[in-house]
Amino acid sequence: RRRRRYDVSLPPARLYDLVDEARARLAGFELDVAGYGHVGDSNLHLNVCDATGYNADVHETLEPWVYEAVAAAGGSISAEHGVGQCKPDHLHLNKPAAAIDLMAAIKRTLDPNLILNPYKVLPAAAVGRPRGFPLFCADDERDDE
């Protein structure tokens, strides 16, 4: 079984809309789509579970749509669990280029060898290194059930 998890924040009035939109978008697939979160800090955990395993069509239907929909709704692609290694290439949806450039400059100053949390938080191009391809994202879980 494969579970895709998205940790995002949305304006309170739109908090559950993403779950309904994801269900509609994924209607052609046999999936379980659920959401839960923290209303107080507008945090939503969108979970998409596929009992048949990994499906590239599901992945392509979800990404980058999930991040674009969150940004269009005035939310953030990064909530309580941070940007991590799965979202750096989508950071531009929430941060202007100048902010990403400043963060990259600070990263290169404090970590000139780019060995601290490699491939996390900032797009690889922003810090001047080729994109790494992690085999397993923290937001993507396999269940052995």
Image: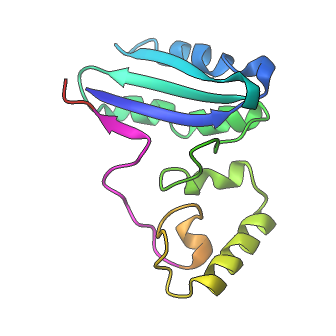
> In the displayed structure, would residue 77 be above or below residue 61?
below
> In the displayed structure, would residue 36 be above or below residue 144?
above
Q: Position of residue 126 (x, y in %)?
A: 62, 72
Left or right, 87 with respect to 38, comes to left
Q: Position of residue 103 (x, y in %)?
A: 71, 70
Left or right, 7 with respect to 133, comes to right
Q: Which of 141 and 135 is in front in this view?
A: 141
When asked about the image quadrant of residue 101, the answer is bottom right
> In the displayed structure, would residue 41 be above or below residue 16?
below
Q: What stretch is highlighted in magenta?
A: 129-142
Residue occupying image coordinates x 56% and y 79%? 128
Q: Nearer the viewer, residue 10 or 70?
A: 10
Q: Quadrant of the C terminus?
A: top left
Residue occupying image coordinates x 66% and y 38%? 68
> In the displayed structure, would residue 124 be above or below residue 75?
below
Q: In which quarter of the image is the N terminus?
A: top left
Q: Nearer the viewer, residue 20 or 111?
A: 111
Colour convention of the picture: rainbow
Q: Is residue 57 magenta?
A: no
Residue occupying image coordinates x 55% and y 40%? 64
